[in-house]
Amino acid sequence: MKNLVISLNSKNERRKHIATEFQEHNVNFEFFDALTPDIAAPYAQNLGLDLDKSQLTPTELACMMSHVAVWKKAIGERIPYITVFEDDIYLGVDAELLLNNHEWIQPDWNIIKIESFYKKVYLSSKTYNILSKKRYIAQLKSKNLGAAGYILSLQGARILLEYVLHNDIQPIDETIFNYFITKNQEPIFQMVPALCVQEMIMKESLESLSLPSSLEEERKIRNSLKKKEDKNIIFKINREVKRLILQLKEILLAKKVIFK
């Protein structure tokens, strides 16, 4: 298993945090230099992606292309399994046992989300115990955003790259853990309890963050602009009805994915 942490080489505090975190858990890792916006745009164009259709901010595109570059590295070097991390995560117990080898991974688990993001998600009823029932793997049946921690087999990297090359550009977490799930091309699995979590999810107060994210600030601005465009009253009513239905369904059927 090769653990790759996407990080700008100028973000010293984040790199120091990752080095400390992985050392404390005895997990091997390598930094993967994140693409900057000035590099990401031509990189995407060289892949044949249509940026004219994209509504991503420059930072969101850079994040997206950094993940794609990691997948291409895995494919080019024929790495059997990689774990892709972002540089603001914390690791849970058993990280050493799960991230330094891939013997516990079944052959058809090509994409495994090991991150906690939403408190509740929809999972398959069929589960697979790992680590003597300390954790289990289940198929993810609903969106569960965040792309700060996931495992890809070589085949999984190929599948996701092929998907990105033939679909509109979206934020990386929306791409993998929302839109790709709805396509039902390949099952995505969730580890429960999750093995990693981003600082912004773990800490309730954004003011207390030691690793603030410019990406999240840009995303908030983009989403707020989109909301201003959605002023149609019928649209708002339909959206609220759908929200209430989903909320009720979540209470009845969704399962917790905690970080441990």
Image (spheres, rainbow, N blue to C red):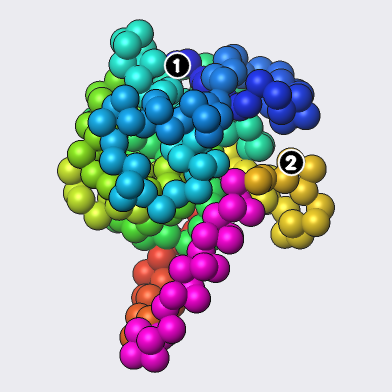
Q: Which residue is mark 2?
A: 211
Give the residue displayed 38% in from the left and 86% down from the top: 232
Vertically, is 244 above or below 76? below
Look at the magenta stretch and give its main secondary structure.
helix
Task: Evaluate whether residue 72 shows in this view.
Answer: yes
The amino acid type of the residue labelled 1 equals: Met
Whole-percent x, y for residue 95 in the image: 58, 28
Which numbered disc, 2 or 1, marks the residue that appears first in the sequence?
Answer: 1
Disc 2 packing (10 Å; few <14; some 14–19; many ≥20): some
Residue 172 lies in what quarter of the image? top left
Query: Which quarter of the image is occupied by the N terminus?
Result: top left
Give the residue displayed 51% in from the left and 68% down from the top: 225
Give the residue displayed 63% in from the left and 32% down from the top: 87
Give the residue displayed 79% in from the left and 43% down from the top: 210
Whole-percent x, y for residue 67 in the image: 44, 31
Q: Which residue is mark 1?
A: 1
Residue 233 lies in what quarter of the image? bottom left
Vertically, is 97 above or below 247? above
Q: Nearer the viewer, mark 2 or mark 1?
A: 2
Whole-percent x, y for residue 134 in the image: 51, 39
Task: Check disc 2 and report its element: helix, strand or loop.
Answer: loop
Q: Which residues are magenta?
A: 215-236
